[in-house]
Image (tube, helix red, strand yellow):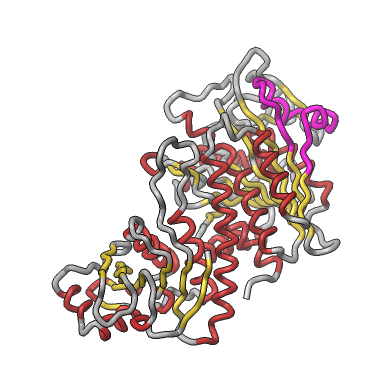
């Protein structure tokens, strides 16, 4: 996608479509006023008659508006003017693109950037434009046969600015937004693939392909024999019941010399049946999404590599299937982790923490600046936060604060949950150092406490994305979250933000 900037009066700029906004109460936005003046008051008349709505995201497309050079004018509702912020900006733009989905638009002019959008700068408005455009046009049709419905052939997007001094920041925002969109799309593609395609080996090949395309990036893949020699018996206990071989993926991007790396660890359970603690059948198809933590950290690496950021970033992905068989791990079995600590496995469906703990131990060898794991870890987090916010837990409040701030800036929000000794007490075991589950109460937090047992001396955070990584129902599919949050975190740490 090509992005450009303009400071022209929007009525005088040629485009296949111009997007302008109207607030509740028939209040025209900045660009809508320009169109209204050029058209002899058309928008005010339509608003007064009820033919234009200020309802957020509701859009009407007008063709051949007199006095306006654009072929179409998409007038989209912006909601309450006092509440118009980034979330509403993105919803409005997405609504306009949806209304234009069947149109043959190759060039779109986004004039919503002229509005006051909370306290967002033009950099972020440009970035959110690029992300919203990409995410609105995203389709996963790889597995469909026959003729596919064509998407809008959009090739150019213009950003309307109040003055030329904003152009450099807007272009930078669009560049960053497009790179984040690449990472989000990759994460969505990986999540949406069926489990008979996206296996641990498929994830490994994807990581290796990224390394071939980026000179600063190196990918190494360990097999089960190598994991066994390293003592990763906790990880291997999860994959014991399947014929599909586990893979341990290590990606290293070097853009900042000898600086200590940021390290992301992503849960890569490419299908989770629950093992011997078998899940109920309804909805089990969605357990192909249990590798969305892995998908998001690989996607974030794709973003960082595309932007060639001045930062060192390592990504670790333990990739496995969790299936029942005569060889599968049983409830009550005890395994030794790579750290030497022993774990009583009371529930084989609490498997994500069993692969992550060995990955966290492995990550120590990088002497990382920070370690952040990302996992579709617990249904309890969905109960606590629904499908709106990612659970954030950390042994360092400053790190947690950075992630929460990154989520706000990226419109990919998290919410901090506590980590405390009283929760960790629930993991006590009579037979091993601790158990892998701690009962129903505070399940998301006890899972975080379990991982915390492997992070002594590390500055570490845990992101539970069980509620945010995918959608169910008619909109079923991977969301690509929290690529935007992680990318914002890395951009801020690398000093790449304007």
- 217 magenta-colored: no
- 233 magenta-colored: yes
- Of 55 and 217, nearer the camera is 217
On the image, the x and y values in percent for residue 478 come to 50, 44
**Residue situated furthest top in the rendering:** 326
- Of 261 and 67, nearer the camera is 67
The residue that appears at 72% across and 22% down in the rendered structure is 334
On the image, the x and y values in percent for residue 133 come to 46, 61
The residue that appears at 77% across and 46% down in the rendered structure is 219
On the image, the x and y values in percent for residue 136 come to 43, 56
Instruction: Judge left or right: residue 442 versus residue 84.
Output: right
Eyeballing the image, is 279 above or below 111?
above
Instruction: Judge left or right: residue 325 versus residue 126.
Output: right
The number of discs equals 0
The residue that appears at 69% across and 45% down in the rendered structure is 207
Report whether residue 80 is seen: no
- Of 303 and 54, nearer the camera is 303
Report whether residue 264 is seen: yes
On the image, the x and y values in percent for residue 262 come to 74, 56
For residue 333, what is the image quadrant? top right
The residue that appears at 50% across and 65% down in the rendered structure is 130
Instruction: Judge left or right: residue 176 versus residue 47.
Output: right
Q: Which residues are magenta?
A: 220-248
- Quarter the C terminus occupies: bottom right
For residue 51, what is the image quadrant? bottom left
**Residue situated furthest left in the rendering:** 49
Eyeballing the image, is 272 above or below 317?
above
């Amino acid at each position: 996608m090509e992005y450009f900037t303009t400071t022209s009066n929007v009525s005088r700029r040629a485009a296949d479509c111009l997007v302008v906004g109207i607030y509740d109460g028939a209040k025209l936005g900045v660009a809508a006023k320009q169109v209204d003046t050029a058209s002899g008051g058309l928008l005010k008349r339509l608003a007064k008659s009820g033919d234009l709505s200020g309802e957020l995201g509701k859009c009407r497309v007008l063709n051949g508006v007199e006095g306006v050079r654009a072929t179409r004018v998409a007038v989209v509702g912006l909601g309450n003017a006092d509440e118009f912020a980034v979330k509403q900006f993105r919803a409005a733009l997405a609504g306009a693109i949806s209304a234009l989905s069947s149109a043959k638009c190759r060039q779109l002019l986004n004039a919503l950037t002229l509005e006051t959008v909370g306290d967002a700068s033009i950099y972020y408005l440009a970035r959110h434009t690029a992300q919203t455009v990409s995410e609105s046009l995203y389709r996963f049709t790889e597995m469909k046969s026959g003729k596919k419905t064509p998407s809008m052939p959009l090739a150019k997007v213009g950003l309307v600015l109040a003055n030329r001094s904003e152009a450099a920041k807007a272009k930078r925002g669009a560049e960053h937004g497009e790179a984040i969109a690449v990472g989000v799309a990759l994460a969505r593609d990986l999540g949406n693939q069926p489990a008979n395609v996206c296996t641990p080996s498929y994830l490994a090949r994807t990581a290796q392909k990224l390394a071939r395309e980026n000179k600063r990036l190196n990918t190494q893949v360990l097999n089960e024999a190598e994991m066994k020699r390293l003592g990763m018996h906790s990880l291997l206990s999860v994959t014991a019941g399947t014929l599909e071989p586990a893979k341990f993926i290590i990606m290293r991007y070097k853009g900042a010399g000898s600086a200590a790396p940021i390290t992301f660890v992503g849960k890569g359970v490419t299908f989770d049946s629950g093992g011997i603690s078998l899940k109920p059948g309804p909805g089990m198809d969605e357990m192909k999404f249990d590798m969305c933590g892995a998908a998001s950290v690989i996607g974030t690496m794709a973003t960082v590599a595309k932007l060639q950021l001045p930062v060192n970033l390592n990504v670790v992905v333990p990739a496995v299937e969790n299936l029942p068989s005569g060889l599968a791990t049983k409830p009550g079995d005890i395994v030794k982790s790579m750290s030497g600590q022993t774990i009583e496995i009371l529930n084989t469906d609490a498997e994500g923490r069993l692969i992550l703990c060995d990955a966290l131990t492995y990550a120590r060898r990088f002497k990382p600046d920070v370690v952040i794991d990302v996992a579709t870890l617990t249904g309890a987090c969905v109960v606590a936060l629904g499908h709106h916010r990612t659970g954030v837990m950390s042994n360092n409040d400053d790190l947690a604060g950075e992630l929460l701030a990154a989520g706000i800036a990226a419109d990919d929000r998290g919410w901090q949950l506590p980590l405390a000794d009283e929760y960790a007490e629930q993991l006590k075991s009579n037979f091993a150092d601790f158990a892998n589950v701690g009962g129903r109460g505070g399940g998301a937090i006890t899972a975080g406490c379990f991982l915390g047992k492997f992070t002594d001396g590390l500055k570490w955070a845990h992101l539970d994305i069980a509620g945010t990584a995918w959608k169910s129902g008619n909109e079923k599919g991977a969301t690509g979250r929290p690529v935007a949050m992680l990318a914002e975190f890395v951009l801020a740490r690398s000093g790449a933000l304007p």
